[in-house]
């Protein structure tokens, strides 16, 4: 098949409706616009998003629903119980967590949450730690260092 062989599907191309050409044509007199009123006039249609004098929808939205911050960091969350697979005195940072398959890469910041228990002492270097997680890591003999996000 080549370009000159291409043609539209049957019945996909129709002639446009010729309005205002007399009663016999089926769209004569008012030409499908009804009788009088805004929509019957030439040039009707108005501005995009005009809502009859109401405050336009897109101007109402921030007051009603806030907005989505596209620059918001997408935190990768881990629990203290997930750190149990590391050996004693191991250094736990985003790179080692990614190597262990606990997080998806090192592009997003990491936060450790306090669910579960920890038996071994670890040197944890992440971007954020909850208070309960910090307490559990330090009670197990480990340390916590915060990285810049």
Image (cartoon, rainbow, N blue to C red):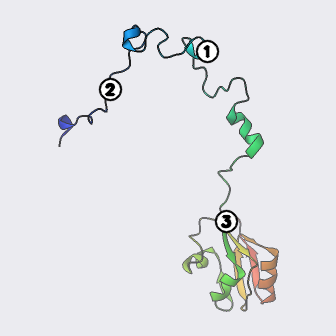
Quickly name the residue at label 1.
38
Residue at image position (68%, 92%) is 88
Name the mark on residue 75: 3
Q: Nearer the viewer, residue 97 or 18?
A: 18
Quickly name the residue at label 2.
14
Nearer to us of marks 1 and 3 is: 1
Q: Nearer the viewer, residue 32 or 96?
A: 32
Compared to residue 123, the image places residue 127 above or below, namely: above
Q: Nearer the viewer, residue 68 or 95?
A: 68
Q: Quadrant of residue 74?
A: bottom right
Residue at image position (65%, 51%) is 70
Q: Residues within 10 Å of mark 1 (few under 14, many from 20)?
A: few
Nearer to us of marks 3 and 2 is: 2
Q: CA distance from mark 1 to mark 3?
A: 53 Å
Q: Locate residue 148, reporting x and y percent.
A: 71, 66
Residue at image position (63%, 29%) is 49
Q: Locate residue 102, reporting x and y percent.
A: 59, 77
Name the mark on residue 4: none
Q: CA distance from mark 3 to mark 2?
A: 54 Å
Secondary element type, mark 3: loop
Work out which quarter of the rendered image holds the N terminus and state it. top left
Q: CA distance from mark 1 to mark 2?
A: 29 Å
Secondary element type, mark 2: loop
- Of label 3 and label 2, which has the lower sequence position? 2
Secondary element type, mark 1: helix
Residue 86 in sight in this render: no
């Amino acid at each position: 098949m080549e370009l000159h062989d291409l043609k539209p599907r049957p019945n996909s191309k129709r002639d446009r409706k010729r309005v205002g050409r007399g009663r016999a044509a089926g769209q004569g007199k008012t030409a499908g616009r009804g009788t009088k009123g805004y929509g019957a006039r030439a040039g009707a249609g108005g501005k995009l998003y005009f809502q009859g004098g109401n405050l336009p929808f897109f101007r109402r939205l921030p007051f009603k629903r806030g907005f989505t911050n596209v620059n918001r960091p997408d935190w990768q969350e881990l629990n203290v119980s997930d750190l149990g697979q590391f050996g004693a005195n191991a250094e736990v940072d985003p790179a080692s967590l990614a190597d262990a398959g606990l997080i998806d890469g090192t592009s997003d910041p990491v936060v450790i949450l306090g669910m579960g228990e920890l038996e071994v002492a670890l040197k944890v270097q992440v971007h954020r730690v909850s208070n309960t997680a910090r307490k559990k890591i330090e009670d197990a003999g480990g340390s916590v260092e915060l990285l810049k996000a």
